[in-house]
Each structure stands twice: as structure tokens, then as C-alpha cells.
Image (tube, helix red, strand yellow):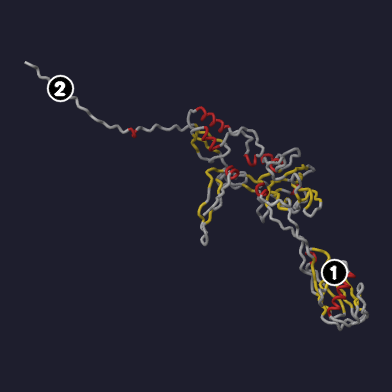
């Protein structure tokens, strides 16, 4: 009898596994390093996973070799050991790095200069002109402008009016004129119709006011070397001082006479000084301590200038010749210009290392350094007639421009302003970095704004 077999299926079960729920692996904190760097966010931990990213954010580590231009490139004279440690750690692939870049912070409630971040140069009352270099504790600017043609000075004038003729009688009338100093003209009436000679007018009381005005003008021109006169064909005599400039303005013209028909103007006026119109720029700022900078060369009016301050000097083939003198007899000569491709470029000529300010720099140990220079602004000036430069202290009221004590902050642009009439502040651009590296290397330009 056959045997019956029953086959029982084990069945199938479907189970769905959600792979998105994989447990997150804790991220490594990485090595924490604190130190100096060329750039980057300051006083906050920034996590960096690769050497390439570290260089992008914080720059290459500083090797301790002083740069040619420390003011612009930063103080690289001290090595950044934390940067090298970060570089080695990231290059090995061990893990990430958290880097805190040190920046300038002030002590809480800072009041003294030692507690404040930033830097300052001692400022004393700026004498103009300073008697000795030792008196200069200040920021000194070098200003540059196109060598445009000066506008000439004019002389002061006064008038004499001849109102009648009856009093012009032989030997009975004279006119004595003076401008209040020693510029004296004496005119005597004489019974003669002859053309007037020095100090004498004629016509014997006859004639017109125009004739007597002409005779007075002739007498002044024949008598005085300090005044000239002309009538212009009328009865008014215009008297002009031969000395140019506003020194003649306000000098009273006085008259002593027995002639009631001559009325002088009360004083000279209308003179102008020789003006030097210009459209220039601040080209550089030097910070000085017991030292001063002067320029030598050809002055704007063609004269030779030796060590002039606040005196316009025309640039030569290689630029300008400058002298920096110290508190003693020490002095050093420099040649400089504002061409970055020239060997005499101002940032190559002068010391730009502020760390040498107190101890002195160069062979003569002079206490100064060159801070800001604006060669792009200089090179935008018109140069068809050449350029001139002069030095002057940068002072505006109580502002001396020598105190730069402030915490490290992010560079900011000015506000972008809306249209009139509200002109509302719209936005401004702010760097993601603290410190001055960003604004030294980047500018914002907006074009075709619609």
C-alpha cells in the first residue's frame, strides 16, 4: 500500500532595513592650536580638515624671515610655530585641526595705553615750522600735486578824484600823498602850461578836470618809485602800488593840501597774493620721533630749495631728494618716487618696519617709519607738466593722526545708499576676517549699476 508524503513549505518573510538610520560616528575634535597667522578670523576656533584649506584661510606659516615691507606684509620676523604645527599635523593625515588665530583685544575696562590694543606714536604740540628736528613727534605727510602754472600776484590800488579846477592856482596849491608808510609824493601847482615835470603840475588854473587828473598822474609817475598812476582818460586818477601782494591792502592813503578839488580814496585795496592752484593728494605718511623730513631741489618758482619743509619741490628724473634728520647732527639722504617698478620707489627707499621705531633704524639710527603710501592716487594725477611735492605735519584741530589704538575688527566698506529723497542706508560689505590684511589686499569695485 503506497505511503502518502506531505511536503510543508517553510514560507518566506520580507523584512525592510532602513539604511538611512546608520548610527553617526563621532567626529574627531582634532588638535587645538593657538598662535599667530598672516590672516583669517581672529579669536575664534576654526576647524580645518586639510592643509590646502588651512593655507586658504590662514595663509602660509611665517618663517621668521623679516619681509622687505613689514608695514604691508606684516611682521614676519617672528616664526609662527603654531602654523607649522598645524601644517605638519594636517600633512600627516592624522586628523583635523582647530586653529585659533590671536588678534588684538583690549583688557576689560582698558584705560592706559599699555592696556589698549593697537599702537600709537607719541604726539607733542607741533611747532610750525619746528625749530629743530627734536621738536617733531608727529605724523608727517608727503603731499603731491601737478606742477600747474602759478597765478601772479596783484598790487593794491587807490583813487584820486579831481572834482574841480578853481583851486589849482600858481604856488597857492600843493598835494602831498602818502600810503601810510614812506611812500610820499609831493605835487606843486605852478603857473605854467608846460607838460608837468617831477612834482609839478601846470595850466595856471585853467583847463578841465581831465587835464588836471592827467597832470597829477604824470607827476606821480615822475616822482615816486613806490606808486604808479593812470587816468584812463577821465578825472579819476588810479594809483597802484608797485609792491605786489596783499601787504598793500588796508594802507591808508592820506592827503595834506590846500586844494579842495582833490579827494583821495581812504585806503588801498584789491591786491592778491601769488596763488598756487593745485589738485593734489596725500601721497605718504611718515611717523617721526625726534626727527624730521625735508626736501631739497628746485622750487616751484624756479628757485633752489635746500631742506625745505612745507615748500613745493618739483620732481626730478628719479623723483625727489629727501633728508631725514635726527635730534643730533645725524642726517640721512634719500631719493624716492611713487613708481613701484623703480629702484627709488618710496617703499624701497624708507624704513617700513615699525618695530625699529624706538631703537632707531639705518646707519644713523633715526626714529621713524613709513606707514601708508598712496602711489595709485599719485599715479592718477596729471603729469604732463610734472609733479611737485611738499611735506607738512598732519594735524586737524586736536586730531593728530598718531593714535591707532583699537581692537582688531573686520574691514568694512562704506554704506551703499539708496536713491533720493530718503537716501536710506541699504547695506555694506564686511570682511570675514579680522585685522588689516584684507583691506590691504582687496578693493571693491561695482560697475554698470542699474
According to the image, label 2 marks what residue? Answer: 7
* Nearer to us in this view, 83 or 56: 56
According to the image, label 1 marks what residue? Answer: 228
**Alpha-carbon neighbours of circle 1 within 10 Å: few (<14), some, or many (≥20)?**
many
**Alpha-carbon neighbours of circle 2 within 10 Å: few (<14), some, or many (≥20)?**
few
* Residue 125 position within the rendered picture, expressed as x and y whole percent measured from the top left: 71, 52
Q: Is residue 41 above or below residue 144?
A: above
Which quarter of the rendered picture does the N terminus lie within?
top left
* Residue 27 position within the rendered picture, expressed as x and y whole percent measured from the top left: 43, 33
State the separation of the CA atoms marked 1 and 2: 144 Å
Q: Is residue 373 above or below residue 204?
A: above
- Residue 430 in view in this figure: yes
Residue at 69% of width from left, 52% of height from top? 382
* Nearer to us in this view, 172 or 127: 172
Of the numbered discs in the image, which one, if any, rests on residue 389?
A: none
Q: Quadrant of residue 13?
A: top left
* Nearer to us in this view, 321 or 291: 321
Secondary structure beneath dot 1 equals strand
Amino acid at each position: 500500500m503506497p505511503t502518502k508524503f506531505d511536503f510543508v513549505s517553510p514560507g518566506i518573510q520580507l523584512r525592510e532595513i532602513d539604511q538611512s538610520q546608520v548610527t553617526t560616528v563621532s567626529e574627531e575634535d582634532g588638535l587645538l592650536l593657538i598662535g599667530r597667522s598672516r590672516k583669517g578670523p581672529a579669536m575664534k576656533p576654526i576647524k580645518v580638515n586639510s592643509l590646502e584649506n588651512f593655507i586658504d584661510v590662514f595663509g602660509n606659516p611665517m618663517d621668521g624671515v623679516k619681509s622687505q615691507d613689514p608695514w604691508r606684509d606684516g611682521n614676519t620676523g617672528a616664526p609662527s610655530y603654531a602654523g607649522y604645527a598645524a601644517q605638519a599635523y594636517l600633512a600627516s593625515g592624522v586628523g583635523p585641526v582647530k586653529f585659533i588665530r590671536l588678534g588684538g583685544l583690549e583688557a576689560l575696562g582698558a584705560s592706559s595705553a599699555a592696556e589698549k590694543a593697537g599702537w600709537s606714536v607719541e604726539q607733542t604740540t607741533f611747532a610750525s615750522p619746528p625749530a629743530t628736528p627734536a621738536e617733531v613727534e608727529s605724523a608727517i605727510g608727503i603731499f603731491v600735486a601737478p606742477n600747474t602754472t602759478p597765478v601772479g600776484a596783484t598790487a593794491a590800488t587807490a583813487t584820486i578824484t579831481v572834482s574841480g579846477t578853481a583851486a589849482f592856482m600858481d604856488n597857492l596849491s600843493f598835494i602831498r600823498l602818502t600810503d601810510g608808510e614812506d611812500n610820499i609824493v609831493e605835487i606843486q601847482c605852478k603857473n605854467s602850461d608846460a607838460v608837468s615835470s617831477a612834482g609839478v603840475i601846470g595850466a595856471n588854473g585853467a583847463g578841465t578836470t581831465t587835464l588836471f587828473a592827467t597832470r597829477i598822474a604824470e607827476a606821480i609817475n615822475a616822482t615816486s618809485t613806490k606808486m604808479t598812476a593812470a587816468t584812463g582818460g577821465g578825472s579819476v586818477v588810479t594809483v597802484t602800488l608797485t609792491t605786489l601782494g596783499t601787504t598793500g591792502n588796508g594802507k591808508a592813503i592820506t592827503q595834506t593840501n590846500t586844494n579842495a578839488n582833490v579827494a583821495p580814496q581812504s585806503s588801498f585795496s584789491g591786491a592778491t597774493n601769488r596763488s598756487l592752484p593745485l589738485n593734489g593728494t596725500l601721497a605718504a605718511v611718515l611717523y617721526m620721533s625726534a626727527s624730521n623730513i625735508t626736501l631739497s631741489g628746485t622750487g616751484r618758482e624756479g628757485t633752489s630749495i635746500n631742506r625745505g619743509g612745507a615748500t613745493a619741490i618739483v620732481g626730478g628724473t628719479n623723483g625727489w631728494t629727501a633728508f631725514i634728520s635726527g635730534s643730533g647732527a645725524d642726517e640721512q639722504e634719500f631719493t624716492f618716487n611713487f613708481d613701484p617698478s623703480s629702484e627709488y620707489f618710496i617703499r624701497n627707499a624708507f624704513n617700513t618696519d615699525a618695530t625699529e621705531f624706538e631703537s632707531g633704524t639705518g646707519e644713523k639710527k633715526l626714529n621713524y617709519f613709513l606707514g601708508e603710501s598712496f602711489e595709485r592716487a599719485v599715479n592718477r594725477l596729471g603729469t604732463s607738466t610734472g609733479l611737485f611735492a611738499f611735506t607738512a605735519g598732519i594735524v586737524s584741530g586736536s586730531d593728530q593722526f598718531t593714535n591707532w589704538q583699537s581692537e582688531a575688527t573686520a574691514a568694512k566698506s562704506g554704506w551703499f545708499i539708496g536713491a533720493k529723497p530718503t537716501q536710506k542706508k541699504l547695506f555694506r560689505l564686511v570682511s570675514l576676517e579680522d585685522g588689516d590684511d584684507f583691506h590691504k589686499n582687496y578693493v571693491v569695485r561695482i560697475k554698470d549699476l542699474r
